[in-house]
Image: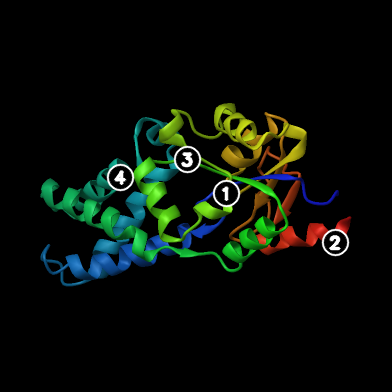
């Protein structure tokens, strides 16, 4: 494989920031606070119901497609968990979901070595873009909290341009801003369908960030051009010159 491309596109969630790994601990902590209010002696009952509802929701591709933004999805998930526990207070369900959405940013951390890698790449003169799906307010809040903007020449947020990965549009938007052809760029992200397949259809070299370290699923029809388990591995490409 050749050395690092001059233009690099990065996903945000579970590529630079640890999102999935921090979600369930945050829900569990919230359940401990809310269980007494709901008359539940054991917070584990509420957490188990939430976890089950969450898994069912995100496994259902059609439901996800119709579900709207992530904050709405959380309301749906919590309401479903409440129903499974025969708690009929939909207003409380929405309030709990909205509390999680407000507090979520404080539970997120950067993945080990991720920001240091961005700084090193920036110091080496790489042109870089951040390409992320999601709501502008939510994603910009993360970017600001972790002071990520100075590392990027371009930040592309789904809501701001009206299209998200795997649509070609955000990739092409980033390439145009960087003044790079697809053959001059790499895309780095954790989602095989959105980040890898989406980039490859535009002609961008796609690197899958295997954030869970479990390897490529045997059933995957997507074949990344390279697999890494941590962003600092990108710096090793400099030694391949």
Alpha carbon separation for disc pair 1 and 4: 27 Å
Instruction: Give the mark, 1 or 3, whose residue is nearer the N terminus.
Output: 3
Disc number at residue 71? 4
Alpha carbon separation for disc pair 1 and 2: 23 Å
Instruction: Give the mark, 3 or 4, whose residue is nearer the N terminus.
Output: 4
Q: In this view, does 156 lie to the left or right of 176?
A: left
* Front label number (4 vs 2): 2
Disc number at residue 239? 2
Disc number at residue 209? none
- The local secondary structure at tag 3 comes to loop
- The local secondary structure at tag 1 comes to loop
Residue 202 is situated, as x and y percent measured from the top left of the image, at 68, 29
Instruction: Give the mark, 1 or 2, whose residue is nearer the N terminus.
Output: 1
* Front label number (1 vs 3): 1
Alpha carbon separation for disc pair 4 and 2: 43 Å
Residue 38 is situated, as x and y percent measured from the top left of the image, at 12, 62
Q: Is residue 123 left or right of residue 83?
A: right
Above/below status of 230 relative to 59: below
Instruction: Give the mark, 3 or 2, whose residue is nearer the N terminus.
Output: 3
Q: What residue is pinned by disc 3?
A: 133
Q: What residue is pinned by disc 1?
A: 152
Instruction: Give the mark, 1 or 4, whose residue is nearer the N terminus.
Output: 4
Alpha carbon separation for disc pair 1 and 3: 16 Å
Residue 114 visible, this orientation: yes
Residue 229 visible, this orientation: no
Crowding around mark 1 (Cα neighbors within 10 Å: few <14, some 14 to 19, many 20+) is some
Q: Which residue is drawn at 11% across and 65% down?
A: 37
């Amino acid at each position: 494989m050749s050395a690092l491309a001059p233009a690099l596109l990065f996903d945000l969630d579970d590529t630079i920031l640890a999102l999935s790994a921090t979600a369930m601990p945050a829900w569990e902590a919230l359940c401990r606070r809310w269980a007494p209010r709901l008359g539940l002696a054991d917070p584990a009952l509420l957490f188990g119901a939430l976890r089950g509802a969450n898994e069912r929701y995100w496994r259902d591709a059609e439901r996800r497609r119709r579900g709207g933004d992530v904050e709405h999805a959380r309301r749906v998930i919590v309401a479903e968990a409440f129903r499974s526990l025969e708690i009929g207070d939909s207003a409380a369900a929405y309030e709990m979901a909205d509390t999680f959405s407000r507090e979520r940013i404080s539970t997120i951390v950067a993945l080990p070595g991720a920001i240091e890698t961005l700084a090193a790449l920036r110091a080496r003169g790489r042109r870089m873009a951040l390409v992320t799906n999601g709501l502008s307010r939510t994603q910009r809040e993360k970017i600001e909290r972790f002071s990520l903007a100075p590392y990027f020449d371009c930040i592309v947020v789904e809501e701001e341009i009206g299209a998200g990965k795997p649509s070609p549009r955000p990739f092409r938007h980033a390439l145009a801003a960087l003044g790079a052809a697809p053959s001059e760029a790499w895309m780095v992200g954790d989602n095989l369908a959105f980040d890898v397949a989406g980039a490859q259809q535009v002609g961008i070299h796609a690197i899958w960030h295997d954030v869970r370290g479990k390897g490529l699923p045997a059933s995957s029809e997507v074949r990344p051009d390279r697999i890494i388990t941590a962003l600092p591995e990108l710096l090793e490409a400099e030694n391949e010159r």
